[in-house]
Amino acid sequence: MNQSLFLWINNACTALPDWLWASLTITGHTSVIFALFSPLLLPKIKRADIITGLFVAAILGGVVSTVVKESLQIPRPPAVFASEQFHLIGHKLELVSFPSGHTLAAFAALTLLALGLKLRGWHLLAPIALASLVGLSRIAVGAHWPLDVLGGAVLGSFCGWGGWLTTKYVHQQAWTQTVIYSSCQMGIILLVSASLFATEIGYPDAIIWQMAAASFGIIISLYSLLLLLKSTELSLKG
């Protein structure tokens, strides 16, 4: 059933262009998510707690994903089907299929936003839709089975929840309110965003979106850092 459902979904998704699925799939890449979360650094928003939660969830998700993948060693669709049986977008992946890491990251980010911003009702629709499309894209590009996506969504939700529980405790500490801590957050987002210019994610059809996300993260994090330094300088003079 898992294989049959994969073939049906993968074939149905060919109705939409490859660049769209490729762009959606790299949206679940951790570096892209970091870049897209950069507006939370801005002084008028200033949700350093959610950024901290994202860092924790990324580490937790990476560990969980690696342990499960290496323990189960489930082959991916390209290792099971001949190339003419399904539609492949981007690079060919054959090993350690379960769970979908991109889906895990997307749902971890969704959970953090839902808990951190206290999203309810229709406000949740857009984040849920985007995370679900990231998961669907992993089938569309031929990288994962439907059960991989489902597993990634469940594990990602738990990782996001774990990240939020951790950040609630961490941000009770005085050092998280310092300029140094805020600067470190901005610096990390800046470096991760910049790394996207040199990172080969494996989806040439999404290169425009990759460069756009990188530029967005760099501009917002750099702007936030400059504002922080400026306000600190004014405070010292005062």
Image: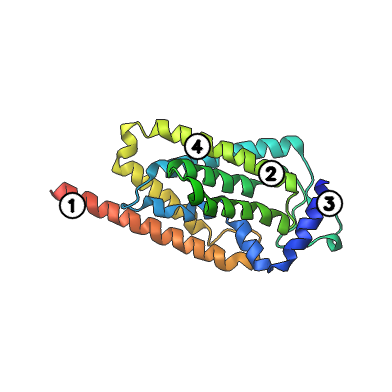
Dot 4: element: helix
Left or right of 218: which side holds 205? right
On residue 150, the disc is 2
CA gap between label 1 and label 3 equals 63 Å
Quarter where residue 206 is shown: bottom right
Mark 1 vs mark 4, foreground winner is 4
Q: Nearer the viewer, mark 1 or mark 3?
A: 3
Left or right of residue 214, residue 106 in this image? right
Amino acid on which the number 1 mark rests in the picture = Leu
Q: Which one is nearer the viewer's eye here, 196 or 76? A: 76
Q: Position of residue 211 (x, y in %)?
A: 53, 65
* Residue at 76% from the left image edge and 47% from the top image edge: 95
Query: How far is the residue under mark 1 from the one under mark 4?
Result: 34 Å
Query: How many angstroms separate mark 2 from mark 4 (CA)?
Result: 20 Å
Q: Which residue is mark 3?
A: 4
Callout 2 environment at 10 Å: few (<14), some (14 to 19), or many (20+)?
some
Please state the horizontal and vertical placement of residue 223, each as a whole percent of the image.
34, 59
- Residue type indicated by callout 2: Leu
- Residue type, mark 4 in image: Gly
